[in-house]
């Protein structure tokens, strides 16, 4: 198979490679002499392949994403739901206030129902026996 054409390296490519080398030097993977030598080679490189060869024996300096457990995913879902509830409740209060704020404070009913629903979901997802298994949507029979 033929080699791909040599792509020219941009200044941003060289800057990114130099930043990666600095991270590896700070992590202790490179000695000071190796770091200086490779840094000079990075700034002298003209192709992307040359930059790749300079960093070939070094791991990717960016940390790998840590997979989230079911409990953390449930906690994030509750935060997201709580944000939606707060927006809905504030919207109802704004409508009540914009219409003159006369009579009974009717948004309390919306606030109470949404708070109960949020508490139920939080208990189901984060309570003593959390249900973190995904549920299949219910099929409605008409």
Image: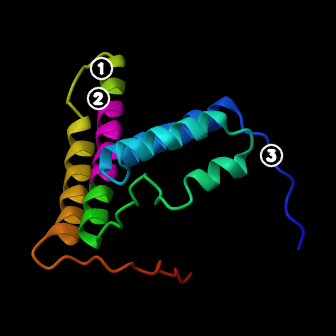
- Helix, strand or loop for the magenta stretch, by majority: helix
Residue under label 3, please give it: 7
Residue hosting label 2: 93
Q: Residue at x 36, y 31 (%)?
A: 91
Q: Is residue 91 magenta?
A: yes
Query: Which quadrant, please, contains the C terminus?
Result: bottom right
**Which x, y percent locates residue 5?**
87, 53
- Crowd tier of the residue under label 2, counting other residues whose Cα lies within 10 Å: few below 14, some 14–19, many 20 or above: some
The disc at residue 57 is none
In this rendering, the answer to whether 30 lies above or below 126 is above
Near-viewer residue (40 or 17): 40
Callout 2 secondary element: helix
Callout 1 touching callout 3 (CB < 8 Å):
no
**Mark 3 residue crowding within 10 angstroms, few (<14) / some (14–19) / many (20+):** few
Q: Position of residue 15 (x, y in %)?
A: 56, 33
For marks 2 and 3, the one nearer the N-term is 3
In the image, which residues are magenta? 79-92
Nearer the observer, 5 or 35: 35
Q: Residue at x 65, y 35 (%)?
A: 44
Q: Secondary structure at mark 1?
A: helix
Q: Which residue is mark 1?
A: 97
Q: CA distance from mark 2 to mark 1?
A: 6 Å
Q: Marks 2 and 3, how far apart in space? A: 59 Å
108 shown above or below 77: above
Which residue shows up at 32% across the image and 66% down it? 68
In this rendering, the count of numbered labels is 3
On the image, the x and y values in percent for residue 72 come to 26, 63
> Within the image, what quadrant is residue 64 found in?
bottom left
Task: Determine contact: label 2, label 1, CB under 8 Å.
Answer: yes
Quadrant for residue 3, please give it.
bottom right
Q: Is residue 104 left or right of residue 74?
A: left
């Amino acid at each position: 198979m033929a080699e791909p054409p040599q792509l020219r390296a941009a200044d941003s490519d060289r800057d990114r490679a130099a930043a990666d080398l600095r991270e590896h030097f700070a992590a202790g993977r490179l000695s000071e002499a190796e770091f200086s030598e490779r840094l000079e080679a990075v700034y002298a490189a003209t192709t992307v392949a040359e930059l790749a060869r300079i960093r070939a024996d070094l791991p990717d300096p960016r940390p790998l994403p840590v997979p989230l457990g079911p409990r953390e995913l449930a906690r994030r879902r509750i935060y997201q739901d709580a944000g939606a509830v707060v927006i809905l409740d504030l919207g109802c209060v704004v409508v009540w206030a914009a219409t003159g704020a006369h009579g009974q404070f009717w948004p309390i009913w919306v606030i109470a129902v949404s708070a109960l629903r949020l508490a139920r979901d939080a208990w189901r997802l984060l309570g003593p026996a959390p249900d973190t298994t995904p549920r299949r949507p219910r099929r409605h029979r008409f």
